[in-house]
Image: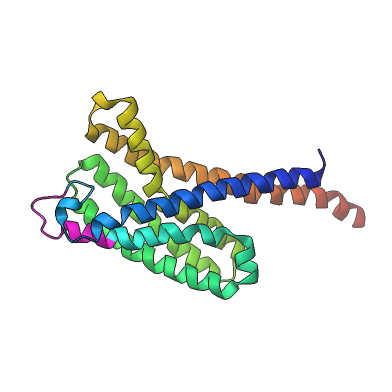
Amino acid sequence: MSTTRARSIRGRKWWALWGLMAVSAVGFAVGSVPPYLTGDAADAPLPLNPEVALHYLSLMVHAVPGALALALGPLQFVNRLRVRRPKLHRVVGRVYMISVVIASTAAAINAAVTISGFAVQVAFFILVLAWLYTLAMAYRSIRRGEVQLHRIWMIRNYALTFAAVTLRVYLLLGLQLSPSTGFEAIYTTAVWASILGNVLVAEYFIVQRMLAPLVRRQRRDAPLVSTLT
């Protein structure tokens, strides 16, 4: 197989995966926000803590900017947008960053008052810390002009943002495949699987899509450098 054809196949696979991710993200973002805009706590899709009057409000503060970050994220991985419209890329990036900060702050409050159990609390606290840390590292690296490192940290960050989608997918699959297990056990498993699974996928993508080509390029250049020296 020629190099050009191999690149073409990789390109089509990338766009197929990107399209699936974008459609899933936008679809979930559009579908998840309305229950939090009615102002009625009875519409909340998640169980509320009856002892915390503002639990519904904190869920809303998390859901709305979180959905915005989820929908905007795929745009940041389009090379043509970064190259041809750098100002737009920066504006979208700033909106994404602010949305994640607001959503993660509310998520920390929700994790503290959730009635879904200790295991879910731990998972969500880890998610919030990782969400903020990867965002801070992405911002720090781009401020230093380290573009490739910025991209790596943003991949990691969006993988955590996208956990909102995979959590629901795992939850629905669990309820369909093992309804007798019980909602709480399935929900706990789905929460942890969405976080850990997305992290593994992100790291695999970083290695295969970004680091492996760099290594191959260095190997190709090594004989030339040896000859010249």
x and y, in percent, of residue 140 in the image: 49, 68
**What span is colored magenta in the figure?**
48-61
Count of numbered circles on the image: 0
Residue 11 in view: yes
**On the picture, is 82 further left or further right than 165?**
right
Q: Residue furthest left?
A: 51
Q: Position of residue 111 (x, y in %)?
A: 24, 51
Identify the image quadrant of residue 30.
bottom left
Query: From the image, which quarter does the C terminus lie in?
Result: bottom right
Where does the image place residue 183, in percent across and percent down from the top left?
23, 33
Kindly identify the residue that appears in the image at 46 percent across and 45 percent down. Answer: 199
Image point (46%, 61%), residue name = 72
109 in magenta: no
Position above or below: 177 against 81: above
- Compared to residue 80, the image places residue 191 above or below, namely above
Q: How is the image coloured?
A: rainbow
In this picture, is 90 found above or below 21?
A: below
Where residue 103 appears, as percent x and y from the top left, is 32, 61
Q: Is residue 56 magenta?
A: yes
Residue 31 appears left or right of 38? right
Quadrant of the rendering where the N terminus is positioned = top right
Q: Residue at image x 41%, y 53%?
A: 161
60 on left or right of 14:
left
Along the line of sight, which residue is nearer the eye, 67 or 226? 67
Q: Is residue 107 visible from the viewing direction of this image?
A: no
